[in-house]
Image (cartoon, rainbow, N blue to C red):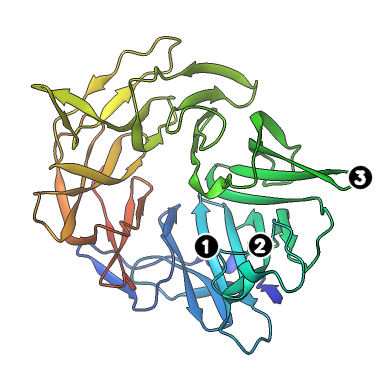
């Protein structure tokens, strides 16, 4: 496994793209949910055991800012950039290498040589990196997979988000007391461009089956929203002021909210399942203010189901299924109240509704698989 950061940060931030209005095709080879920060689009491309992280302004020249090479293996070696998050000058991303099917034998777990569970494949490395756009990047979490039956300490990051120079991430940490293995699931924030002290806001002991990939994480300004997979009722959101570590609220259990995002003023916006005339209904967004007992404001309905959401200071980007029989989603922008909607696409993949928006630029994927990445300016 080989990884390489490319020192092109100053040139990237100085480059200006042309003015644009209509959607622009960024690449035919996107392999991850895109990120948008500072008007730039970030995406990953994967070719066998090689992967790269790229960025560009819509219509501008693409720059490669990170490369990753997977192991030499006879059986389907791979390298993947699995998640990307970005702000104007700062970014974070997770990576994975291995061969075959990585999900049966994650690198964080212990698997002795000859383990039958690993016949289909195994993950040999995963990590979370963060740093200024273009590098250098600091490894904040990660583990190298080994064929061993002994307990091995390590950490594996899952869902990530960034705001300003802070990165928030869900993480599973494995501890070894002698050869006794225990694991903790937790939510962590590091500021200072990833170089600051790790602030652990909450966590719990978990079983081997817990995955930080299933947590929901959103950070904006001083607020962080966390929906843990293992440490609470599944899907229950906790809102923190992460600088102080103060818990603002846990949403009542009647609110299962997915997807969701948080704005810089601490408002959590997401799709609850509502009861309408005795039946469960989706497609609505609810805005929860940062109060101890938040009373939600229900926004006008978006189709029959919201599949993707991005909230900025003044606007929303929403991917939703317009009807029961629709094969693709509609992507729109709106103001924070869900009004003044502008359609960007009617071909957002409903299974992989990959999109992001920073309030000035939106990016999304289309196709089956969703490899075509588009971008467009959005009105404020």
Q: Which callout, 1 or 3, points at the residue further toward the start of the chain?
A: 1
Specify few, some or many for label 2: CA neighbours under 10 Å numbering under 14, 14-19, or 20 or more. Answer: many
Which residue matches tag 1? 82
Q: Pointers 2 and 1 in contact (CB under 8 A)?
A: yes
Which residue matches tag 2? 126
97 above or below 140? below
For the residue pair 203 and 292, the one nearer the viewer reads as 203
User: Is residue 166 among the parts visible in the rendering?
Assistant: no
Residue 209 % position (x, y): 59, 47
For the residue pair 369 and 360, the one nearer the viewer reads as 369
238 above or below 169? above
12 vs 234, left or right, is: right
Assign a secondary structure to mark 1. Answer: strand
Q: Which callout, 3 or 2, points at the residue further toward the start of the chain?
A: 2
Q: Nearer the viewer, mark 1 or mark 3?
A: 3
Q: Pointers 3 and 2 in contact (CB under 8 A)?
A: no
């Amino acid at each position: 496994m080989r990884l390489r950061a490319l020192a092109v940060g100053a040139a990237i931030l100085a480059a200006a793209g042309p003015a644009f209005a209509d959607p622009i095709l960024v690449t035919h080879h996107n392999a991850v949910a895109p990120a948008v920060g500072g008007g730039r689009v970030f995406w990953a491309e994967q070719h066998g055991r090689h992967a790269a992280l790229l960025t560009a302004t819509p219509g501008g020249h693409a720059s490669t800012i990170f490369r990753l090479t997977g192991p030499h293996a006879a059986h389907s070696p791979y390298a993947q950039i699995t998640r990307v998050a970005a702000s104007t000058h700062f970014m974070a991303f997770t990576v994975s290498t291995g061969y075959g099917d990585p999900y049966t034998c994650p690198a964080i777990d212990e698997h002795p040589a000859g383990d039958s569970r690993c016949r289909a494949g195994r993950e040999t490395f995963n990590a979370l990196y963060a740093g200024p756009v273009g590098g250098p990047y600091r490894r904040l979490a990660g583990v190298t997979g080994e064929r061993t039956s002994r307990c091995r300490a390590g950490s594996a990051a899952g869902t990530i988000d960034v705001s300003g120079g802070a990165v928030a991430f869900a993480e599973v940490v494995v501890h070894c007391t002698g050869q006794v293995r225990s694991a903790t699931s937790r939510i962590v924030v590091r500021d200072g461009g990833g170089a600051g002290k790790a602030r652990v806001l909450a966590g719990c002991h978990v079983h081997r089956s817990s995955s930080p990939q299933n947590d929901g994480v959103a950070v904006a300004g001083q607020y962080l929203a966390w929906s843990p997979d293992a440490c609470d009722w599944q899907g229950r959101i906790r809102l923190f002021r992460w600088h102080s570590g103060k818990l603002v609220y846990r949403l009542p259990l009647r609110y299962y909210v997915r997807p969701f995002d948080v704005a810089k003023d601490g408002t959590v916006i997401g799709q609850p399942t509502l009861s309408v005339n005795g039946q469960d209904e989706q497609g609505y967004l609810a805005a929860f203010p940062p109060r101890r007992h938040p009373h939600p404001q229900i926004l006008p309905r978006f189709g029959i189901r919201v599949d993707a959401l991005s909230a900025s200071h003044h606007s929303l980007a929403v991917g939703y299924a317009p009807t029961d029989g629709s094969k693709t989603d509609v992507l729109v922008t709106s103001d924070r109240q869900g009004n003044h909607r502008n359609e960007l696409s009617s071909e957002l993949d409903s299974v992989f509704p990959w999109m992001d928006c920073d309030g000035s630029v939106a990016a999304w994927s289309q196709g089956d698989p969703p490899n075509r990445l588009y971008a467009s300016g959005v009105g404020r």
